[in-house]
Amino acid sequence: MNIFVLMKRTFDTEEKITISNGKINEDGAEFIINPYDEYAIEEAIQVRDANGGEVTVVSVGNEETEKQLRTALAMGADKAVLINTEDDIEYGDQYTTAKILAEYLKDKEADLILGGNVAIDGGSGQVGPRVAELLGITYITTITKLEIDGNTATVTRDVEGDSEVIETSLPLLVTAQQGLNEPRYPSLPGIMKAKKKPLDELELDDLDLEEDDVEAKTKTLEIYLPPKKEAGKVLEGEVEDQVKELVKLLHSEAKVV
């Protein structure tokens, strides 16, 4: 099987985020594979081991993303591809990323494409479905189980506390939800092997794309942290008096009524 994984480099979930001039300050910050993408990588490896083929992990980013791609190779992926946009795109959004990935994948004859359900930094969940739409293939989101039998896939997906089972055919794009599997840690032999596995680096020119072709459809004007929580108030007295005081506070301070 020809399997691809869409991977994103994100802030470490343990990292304390700081804001400078309306932007996230990346200086000294630690980065990791987006946790939901780890489920996708693990599932891709398991599908390959059960059905044969190879796993290629693809990411759009800068040269620093090579570290996370090497981690994916150490987990067991066969190949990695970095589409380096650092010198070409000042600002991109989900449309930008999806357009680039779809352009790369359009002639790769992928049987299965996996990605994380969402990225923990943006949380839009748009890239996977957008890529599938551009490629003209079926997609299923938030999956918690995947079974492949020849050209048929049986997928279980999370639907707000319940499950839905779908049967479809390949090629297929799915996005991984927590519970799909338990991602493995890279072993020492895996880390050593990863150093010798192919990691190709491409730019927009290699995909016959111009900057105008992938111009963002949205623009982030400002990023800011939520305000610090203030101490709560305890209402005392008779219930009737508490209700009156509560309504007054909701109107004058919280401004919600």
Image: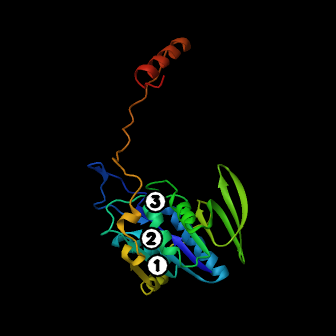
Q: Position of residue 188 (x, y in %)?
A: 46, 81
- Determine if residue 183 is in view: no
Between circles 3 and 2, the one closer to the viewer is: 3
Q: Nearer the viewer, mark 1 or mark 3?
A: 3
Which corner quadrant of the image does residue 55 belong to? bottom right
Return the x and y of residue 199 as percentages of the image width and height.
42, 81
Query: Alpha-carbon neighbours of circle 1 within 10 Å: few (<14), some, or many (≥20)?
Result: many
The amino acid type of the residue labelled 1 equals Ala
Do the numbered discs 3 and 2 sit on residues whose CB atoms are within 8 Å? no
Element under disc 3:
helix
Under mark 3, the amino acid is Tyr
Q: x, y (%) of residue 159? A: 66, 52
- Between 207 and 78, which is closer to the camera in this rendering? 207
Residue visible at 64% across and 83% down?
52
- Contact, CB < 8 Å: mark 1 with mark 2? yes
Q: Secondary structure at mark 1?
A: strand
Residue topped by disc 3: 95
- Residue 197, placed above or below residue 235: below
Quarter occupied by the N terminus? bottom right
In the displayed structure, 2 sits above or below 227; it is: below
Q: Position of residue 26 (x, y in %)?
A: 31, 59
Mark identifier at residue 80: 1
Q: Label 3, label 2: how many angstroms apart (C-alpha)?
A: 14 Å
First reached walking from the N terminus: tag 1 or tag 3: 1
Mark identifier at residue 59: 2
How busy is the neighbourhood of tag 3: few (under 14 within 10 Å), some, or many (20 plus)?
some
Residue 234 visible in the displayed image: yes
Disc with the residue nearer the chain's start (1 vs 2): 2
